[in-house]
Image (tube, helix red, strand yellow):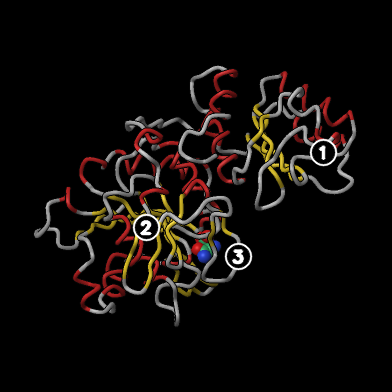
Amino acid sequence: MSTLSRLAQATPTQERLLVIYTGGTIGMQQADNGLTPGGNFAQRMAKALSQLPVVQQQLLPAYDVISYANLIDSSTATPLNWQQLADDITSRLTEYRGFVILHGTDTLSWSAASLAYQLQGIDRPVVLTGAMLPLEAPNSDGLNNIHGALRFAATAELQEVAIYFANRLMRGVRAVKHHSSALTAFSTPCYPLLGERVGDDFGYYPSRGLALQQRGAPRFELADYQGLSQGEVVRIALWPGMAAWQLDAWLSDPRVKGAVLQLWGAGNLPNDPALLNLLASASGEGKLLAAISLCPEGSVHMGAYAAGQGLTDAGVLSGDAMTPEATFTKLVHLLAQPIGFDVQRQRFLTSLVGER
Ligand code: ASN
């Protein structure tokens, strides 16, 4: 890990931000075998920011940059990367007023959701961003995204994990990547924006942020994700004709400890008792099962249709309108806690960080 300070002499650390560069397209450069995360990022970022209009440069907060030694394309991230990010933030919490994480976009919303659960009650901004095009590429969105992330990470009223992308500030645990190439790649389908850039102004909407009574005091849960980083939580999306033996293949494996089930519409499952029996026995064995919809918007209402009735009896928990990211990372997080099955289930149904 390398650290480099900008304005280091001029500004005490408590007034600075920490930027953590993890890899992703934003920092990628052309190599013989294609785009790969490039180094020397602190200098490259400073050079890019120096292209902003002088007025905007003067409004930038001071910051330090850490670059991870192992820069990754975020498609290779696992829960251990989420754990490392949370550790790196908490170990420097008292030194910095806010944090910016530069991350690949493919799994950016997964890291954001996981951080929200690990850093419950955080009292300062943690803003993740990345880019669809490398920082030095023509028409890159990298500079704009870094600029906005720095500005919002210096906004003291923002006290939660957020994503800044394409002029929009979003709750991290509500976000999804919905487009594979558009610069407006992220959205929060079931929650309004926390803030946005309009012209040269960066406006935060405090009424949409986590309220103090909802946020609570900082009570970080830095769990060990080691036992959950090799596929122990699975994600099963239904398809027409899915058969019981296929569900069984996923759920009967003793290594599987939890599953996100993506059901039809408002929470429907084919009317096959064998499917419900499999779910009931997996849940009876202590596997944490949660259902959300295959639809990107709207909630599951288990039991609304005859075909979905029986899910609650089979022990399946309703994920309401939670995103796949928020549901999956919450299962990982709860399974890593030293708490019993009933408490895990009850906490799943409780909104911990505004995820439901
Ligand atoms: N594959 C890249 C990543 O997630 C995509 C990006 O950053 N735009 O690391």
Q: Viewed as shown, does residue 244 lie left or right of 57?
A: right
For marks 3 and 1 on the same chain, the one whose residue lies earlier in the sequence? 3
Q: Position of residue 179 (x, y in %)?
A: 60, 65
**Above/below status of 151 relative to 323:** below
Res 103 → quadrant: bottom left
Whichever of labels 3 and 2 marks the residue nearer the N terminus, that label is 2
In primary-sequence order, the first of circles 1 and 2 is 2
Q: Residue 269 shows which numbered tag? A: 1
Mark closer to the observer (3, 2): 3
- Secondary structure beneath label 2: strand
Q: Which one is closest to the eye, mark 1 or mark 2?
A: 1
Q: In the rendered structure, which amino acid carries the disc numbered 3?
A: His
Which residue position holds label 2? 21
Percent position (x, y) of residue 48? 31, 74
Q: Residue at x 38, y 67 (%)?
A: 197
Instruction: State if disc 1 and disc 3 touch (CB < 8 Å).
Output: no
Viewer-closest of 118 and 272: 272
Cβ(mark 2) to ligand 1 < 8 Å? no
Q: Secondary structure at mark 3?
A: loop
Determine whether, in the image, residue 234 is placed left or right of residue 76: right
Q: Position of residue 234 (x, y in %)?
A: 67, 38
Q: Is residue 299 above or below residue 136?
A: above
